[in-house]
Amino acid sequence: MIPKESSKEKNPFISMKNLKYFPLIQKPDCCSATCLQMILFRKGHTEYSQDELAKDLGIFIDRKNKGAFSVKLKVRLKESDVNRTIESADKINALFRKHKIKLEAKSYKISEIKNPTEFVNDALKKDYDVWAEFANKSLFGTSGGHDCLISELKKKRGKYFVTLVDPYWNHKQIYEVPFDKLIESMQKRENLKPVRERGFIIIRGK
């Protein structure tokens, strides 16, 4: 006799029905372009490819990955050729103006935010897009940095967690992390290579 499935059992598959973002998978070095693409998809702008967005953002890629793209992107030649999302608000806004998209991007380094919990909670309540750039070390134990979108902030057992929408092909697409760990990963620390401050991009508009 086949046992009945308990109503309390969680479905292991992701239902797209109630998701804020349609999860997309990035090409190499394109977590920022893919986060922007997911934001545009949510707003109904589905006509922009990851490659086009990467070019507009000035993304650096490794030479070995040139064949993965249909457009010519900048090849990383030196150590300083790093993709810095938190410094890209002007490029994002130029892209919006170029394509006549009625959105606006503003960047916030983590040191500029007095209360990160209130900041993210307020942005989500206003239905803004919250785009996070962080170092990998605190969350994944690896080097380098990454971008994800935040779809939810909630408190469980006295601690705050955020739901990340992650474009990286070797991660789960949607998962929770402790909010304090995410904030730690944005701070300028010697053990978070490359050493620089990170933070949030907030996208407003429709």
Image: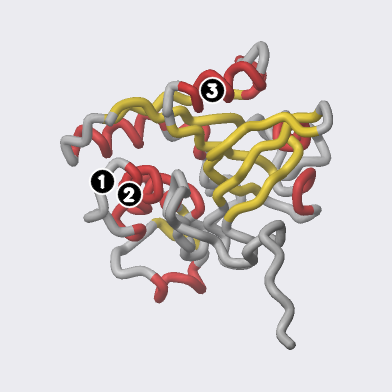
Mark closer to the observer (1, 3): 1
* Residue for point 57% across, 58% down: 173
Q: Looking at the image, is 199 positioned above or below residue 84?
A: above
Task: Describe the element under mark 3 as helix, strand or loop.
Answer: strand
Q: How many marks?
A: 3
Task: State the image coordinates of residue 1 (x, y, percent, origin top left).
Answer: 74, 88
Residue that label 1 marks: 44
* Residue for point 65% across, 20% down: 116
Image position of 7 (left or right of 24): right
Q: Residues within 10 Å of mark 3 (few under 14, many from 20)?
A: some
Task: State the image coordinates of residue 70 (x, y, percent, origin top left).
Answer: 30, 69
Q: Nearer the viewer, residue 189 or 45?
A: 45
Disc 2 to disc 1: CB gap under 8 Å: yes
Residue that label 2 marks: 41
**Labels 1 and 3: the sequence-earlier one:** 1
Task: State the image coordinates of residue 68 (x, y, percent, origin top left).
Answer: 41, 73
Residue 76 visible in the current orientation: no
